[in-house]
Amino acid sequence: MSAVLSKLRGESFSDEEGSDYITEPKSERLPALPTDPYAAAIDSDVLQLGSIVETQERFDPCMDDLLGKGMLLAGSQGTGKSNIIGLVARSAGQIGMPFLIIDFKGEFYTLTDVVPNGIVAGHPDASDQFSGGFFPLTSENTAELAQILMEGPFQVILDVPSYNGDNDEVAAVIANLLHALMDWSKDIKRQGGDPWPCLVITDEAHNFLPERKPLSALVMQRPDESFGSMTKAYSRMANTGRSFGYTLLLATQRLPNIAKWSIANLQTKVILAHAEKNDLNACEVETGGLVDKEVIKRLQQGTGVVMGFTHDPIIVHFDKQLARHVSVTPKVAHLKKQFSHSRSQQQDISKFMSTKYQSSLAVNEYVNTPVEPVNDRECPVNIHEGEETINDQNTPKFTPEQSAEVLKAYGILLKSGQAPTRNALRIWLYENVSKAWNTSQKNYDVFKAICDEYGL
């Protein structure tokens, strides 16, 4: 274990299996970044969130006021959930606190740049996708990561997309890792020690803890087993994790879709804007009716209702996190900039596709009318990229003469449509028309002669 910790802290060497856990050495407490307007708060163990809308006063509650209570973070897409997770993670990292972020969309790896000992954990095959510290995580080595996370301490981003859709493995990894964290703290207690605090943050939590399995975006081969294992692990941490130092933060964009039991004990809540009726109704329930649905509906991006830190709900405008934000919706301006050099090419393609459609209409009835072959040599075939041809009873059948007529009809129409280039049309004709007739040299010569005759 000490060797692994050394690797993660920056001493470059490999273990017996050749695994690489190398990261840049970092200090125990990261200094304030030059662009951080609230750098003075770093040494005061606070949760740096933002400012109160009504008074413009800073709202930076004590971190201890979050620990053991848990947090529900709810907001529709694009309202600022990821930003708030970044703020919470940055604040925890600045005071040297370990945390685990279960990253559903693969967007939080940039947090490793703004916390002291940030590493990414993911599928072993994804190690070359991330710079800095990486832990190749499987369902078998979760106990090792749990010990590293707590004893480093490290701030770990579990990258779910790195498992390439093997969601049963994802479920096993998450369940085993949560149990391993609980077991680590239990062992510390049995040895007479006191475990220290750790945040466990789950983004898009409704996918891991759905009210009903079909509401999750995780497609499982063994849904009952996989969802059951995650439910047991989260339930254990939610019900007894407080005394072992663990604080859950569950973020969701669909409150009605997340299991009600999983958010029942979360005492601090951040409610961002919602628009759907069911979501607004669920928000009203979660705020105990203290916040009107119309208020929630009218919240601006980056602004939310915060409950649990103060006696009454307050509306907070949240700071912008310092880590690079990668979860953004691409805009039209970026599209135009990216492809401005190929605008003329796009116009050619547009003409080409339009011509193809018109041509298809013109000869569709003729092409799709089966005819009796004259002899075996004139039977049509499907083409398989140079492999031996295979007869297909469903393929339209043409004699060489009929094939020539089809090509002639296409040639005239395509030429009149002013399609872009000869090569493009020749390739398209060969791929879409010649599949219906024999690829012998004789027929190819006919095809070539017709292309040449009509300037294709």
Image (cartoon, rainbow, N blue to C red):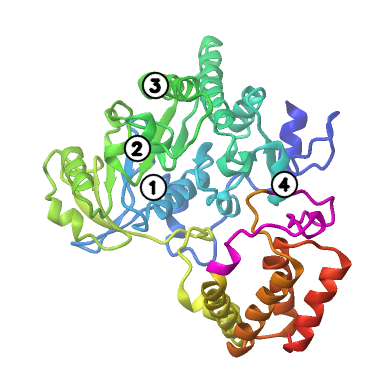
Return the x and y of residue 169 as percentages of the image width and height: 59, 29
Residue 11 magenta-highlighted? no
Above or below, 452 against 59 in this view is below
| Structural crowding at the residue carrying mark 4, measured as other residues with C-alpha within 10 Å and reported as few (<14), some (14–19) or many (≥20) | many
Report if the CB atoms under discs 2 and 1 are less than 8 Å apart: yes
Tell me the kind of residue under disc 3: Ser
Residue 456 vs residue 149: left or right? right
Tag 2: residue type? Leu
The count of marks equals 4
Residue 150's image quarter?
top right
Is residue 236 positioned above or below 103 on the image? above
For mark 1, does the 10 Å Cα neighbourhood hold few (<14), some (14 to 19), or many (20 or more) residues?
many
Please state, as top left, top right, bottom left or bottom right, where the C terminus lies in the image. Answer: bottom right
Magenta: main secondary structure equals loop
Residue on which disc 2 sits: 66
Nearest the eye: 243 or 395: 395
Which residue is under mark 3? 235
Q: Identify the residue under disc 1.
A: 47
State if disc 3 and disc 2 touch (CB < 8 Å).
Answer: no
Q: From mark 3 to mark 4, how far is it between C-alphas? A: 33 Å
Residue for point 59% across, 34% down = 166
